[in-house]
Amino acid sequence: MKKINLLLVIVLLFGFISCGGDKGIVLRYMMWGKPEEIRAVQNFIREFQKIYPEIEVRIIHTSSYNDKLKTMFAGGDAPDVFYMGSEHFPGYVARDTLLDITDFIKNDPETNLPPFSIKDYFKETLQPFMYKGRYYGIPKDFTTMVLYYNKDLFDAAGVKYPARSWTWDDFKRAAQALTRDTNGDEITDQFGFVFESWLGYWISWIRQNDGKVYDERTGKYVIGREPYLSRNVETFQYIYDLMYKYHCAPTLQETRDMEASQLLETGKVAMATYGRWRTLEMKHVKAFAWDVAELPYKRKRASTLFTVCYSISKNSRYKEAAWKLVKFLVGEKGQIETAQSCLAVPSLKPIAYSDHFLAPAVLPRINAQSFLNSISYSEISPPHPNAQLLNDTINLYLDRIFIEKQPIRETLIQLQKEIDKISKEEEEKSTI
């Protein structure tokens, strides 16, 4: 553990890890991630440099990724290859900062690696990184949101495991049955479910009720506007009732005090919704059996698609070398490592449908197919040039609902007004 902490300190203090010696071509590769991901990337780069010893790769890692990337672009010092989240992509491509890699994809000028085929990747993960029919990134991986559950707690309560047919009513009944005061002190020790308040977490519930936060056709946020307002109110009321009426989920204030992300691993909640990233922690759990399932639904099936691509700076000095690196990272070796690490779902379909992902040796046999089944009805978080500010504003207003207990409908209407104000100000700035 001390070695891991020391690694992070070194990375954060000096800003980059250099892989390779003094080469003629130096690529800067910018990433986020936990120590496990840093180590995986270092392994990728070492393999890459066996094939291309003339290319040096310097890894830049930071905990404040989006702010750092913005600053580097603003200062004319952008990295060559970097992670790009789907929700932030519109802002960068609109400012003409990303390299159009369509010709590389179609013509693939180098021969040291197997030919690149765009057809081998999930179209759902490619689409978020296209602009006007052109490609500006290749997805490194993705995940859908699924339901994690503690099988031992289900067995102890005599509750059947989550099924694909589960509705919101089925989910609520199970959550109630799985909520317990285990020591008789009139304080809940075990909750049926835990809810977190960030946008990517709860937007699946909005969509399951056929509501909307963002209208893709118009490019506008509509969370507090009819015809979606009433259904959005209904969704938040359902979640609110799980906390305050049925007491089968901790309140948001309680989850912040209890560190919500650890409740599942410690056996204090029976169910939680997360992406594949939660498996990084769950793979170490030995105290109980666990599994995953598709999310419940109300009016329709819905999940959230989280995807990240590798993009190349338009001003990179070494565009062909950068393409070689991207092609290697999204190739078979990199995708197998992604699958076996349990970090995410590989974007390369042959690997995603193989035992590298469906049955890696480090996991018990779980229903990993749930992640893949969810692709067809998943959508990304709202992609917007000013996504970060707008999402932060939404989360602030949701605290008013779930912590301050302000009326849901009125709060969403006020939120819509604030969003419209921010959007108008940004539009005015862009015309100056």
Image (cartoon, grey):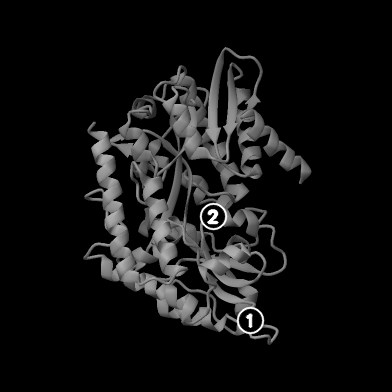
Q: Residue at x 41, y 80 (%)?
A: 169
Is residue 148 among what the camera can see? Answer: no
Task: Quote the CA–CA distance across marks 2 and 1.
Answer: 32 Å
Residue 256 x, y percent position in the rendering = 57, 63
Three-letter residue code for mark 2: Arg
As drawn, 2 above or below 243: above
Q: Nearer the viewer, mark 2 or mark 1?
A: 1
Relative placement, left or right, of 270 versus 236 is: right
Label 2: state its secondary structure: helix
Relative placement, left or right, of 300 versus 307 is: left
Q: Residue at x 28, y 58 (%)?
A: 416
Residue 270 x, y percent position in the rendering = 59, 73
Q: Residue at x 49, y 75 (%)?
A: 243
Residue matched to label 2: 276
Residue matched to label 1: 187
As drawn, 42 above or below 146: above
Residue 287 x, y percent position in the rendering = 72, 68
